[in-house]
Image (cartoon, rainbow, N blue to C red):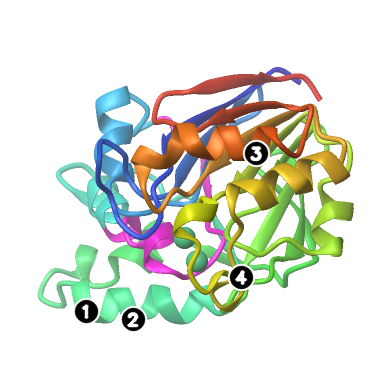
């Protein structure tokens, strides 16, 4: 299967410094999946010309920096021309977020826009640990260590692992074992490390250590609290691993060969 992973956004918390919050496009022969849809992702997808190429959406967890642009994407698909609904996959508690977004941002006086998110994205709930198939692409999940239910994802046909948000654990090391491409939470560098474990994230050093122990070939650091720390993040990760280390930036992309 020919495939490519493309970074749409890689900033933690909010868009800024030239990057949307979390968003990745996985393009294969079978389909194009949007993985996470944080604020700024819809604008960047439009700028890159991919906005109308999406066949399905996977949301790792309900934190705003991973799902808030679902409202913008829903309205894009409803107005001015209605496009077909897209399958949406995510952890079970995302269902509550979707209906809350409809409650706040739906337009009850317009039947086509009363429930924009639910109507645009028929939802399949996944317990972390479940495997599933989205648009012909097989995806395994595990529960990331994060304050809300969060799906770390492995695409076994493609050699790709995405940690989503989460602390480094032995289970994550096993889950990422042998990946060709590991896209890893690297929210902090050591110098701005604050209360890391409580918030369930990794440092660049921790991501490097994970890559080393999981024997991955290529490590892509992402989810930066500070986009200006990307160079420092790569330096820190490289102290831990012989893997090729890169720091995500919108537009970067990699061929996936499994
Ligand atoms: Zn996040
Ligand atoms: Zn989060």
* Residue 87 x %, y %: 53, 53
Q: Residues within 10 Å of mark 4 (few under 14, many from 20)?
A: many
The disc placed on residue 91 is 4
Query: Which residues are drawn in magenta?
Result: 53-71
Seen from the viewer's position, the closer of residues 9 and 116 is 9
The residue indicated by pointer 3 is: 237
The residue indicated by pointer 2 is: 100
Residue 55 counted in the magenta span? yes
Compute the Cα span from label 4 to label 2. Answer: 15 Å
* Residue 66 x %, y %: 44, 58
The disc placed on residue 104 is 1
Query: Is tag 3's residue or tag 4's residue first in the polypeptide sequence?
Result: 4
Whether residue 162 sits left or right of residue 64 in the image: it is right
Image point 28% across, 60% down: which residue? 71
SS of the residue at dot 2?
Answer: helix
Compute the Cα span from label 1 to label 2. Answer: 6 Å
Q: Quadrant of the N terminus?
A: top right
Whether residue 104 sits left or right of residue 160 in the image: it is left
Residue farthest to the left? Answer: 109
Residue 256 can be seen, yes or no? yes
SS of the residue at dot 4?
Answer: loop
Compute the Cα span from label 3 to label 1. Answer: 41 Å
Image point 32% across, 24% down: which residue? 48
Mark 3 Cβ inside 8 Å of ligand 1: no
Q: Are marks 3 and 2 in contact (CB under 8 Å)?
A: no
User: Please, is residue 97 above or below residue 69 in the view?
Assistant: below
* Residue 184 x %, y %: 63, 46
User: Please, is residue 5 above or below residue 185 in the view?
Assistant: above
Disc tally is 4
């Amino acid at each position: 299967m020919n495939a490519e992973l493309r970074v749409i956004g890689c900033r933690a918390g909010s868009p800024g410094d030239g990057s949307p919050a979390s968003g990745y496009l996985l393009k294969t022969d079978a389909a194009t999946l949007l993985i996470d849809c944080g604020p700024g992702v819809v604008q960047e997808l439009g700028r890159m010309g991919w906005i109308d190429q999406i066949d399905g959406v996977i949301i790792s967890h309900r934190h705003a920096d991973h799902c808030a642009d679902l409202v913008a994407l829903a309205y894009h698909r409803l107005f001015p021309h209605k496009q077909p609904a897209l399958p949406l996959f995510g952890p079970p508690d995302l269902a509550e977020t979707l209906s809350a977004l409809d409650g706040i941002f739906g337009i009850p006086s317009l039947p086509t826009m009363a429930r924009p998110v639910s109507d645009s994205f028929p939802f399949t709930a996944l317990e972390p640990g479940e495997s599933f198939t989205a648009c012909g692409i097989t995806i395994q999940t595990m529960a990331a260590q994060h304050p809300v239910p969060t799906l770390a994802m492995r695409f076994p046909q493609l050699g790709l692992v995405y940690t989503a948000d989460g602390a480094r654990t032995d289970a994550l090391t096993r889950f990422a074992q042998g990946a060709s491409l590991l896209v890893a939470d690297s929210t902090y560098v050591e110098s701005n490390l604050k209360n890391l474990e409580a918030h369930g994230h990794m440092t660049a050093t921790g991501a490097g250590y994970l890559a080393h122990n999981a024997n991955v070939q290529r490590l892509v650091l992402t989810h930066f609290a500070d986009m200006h720390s990307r160079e420092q993040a790569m330096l820190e990760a490289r102290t831990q691993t012989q893997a090729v280390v890169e720091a995500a930036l919108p537009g970067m992309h990699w061929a996936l060969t499994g």
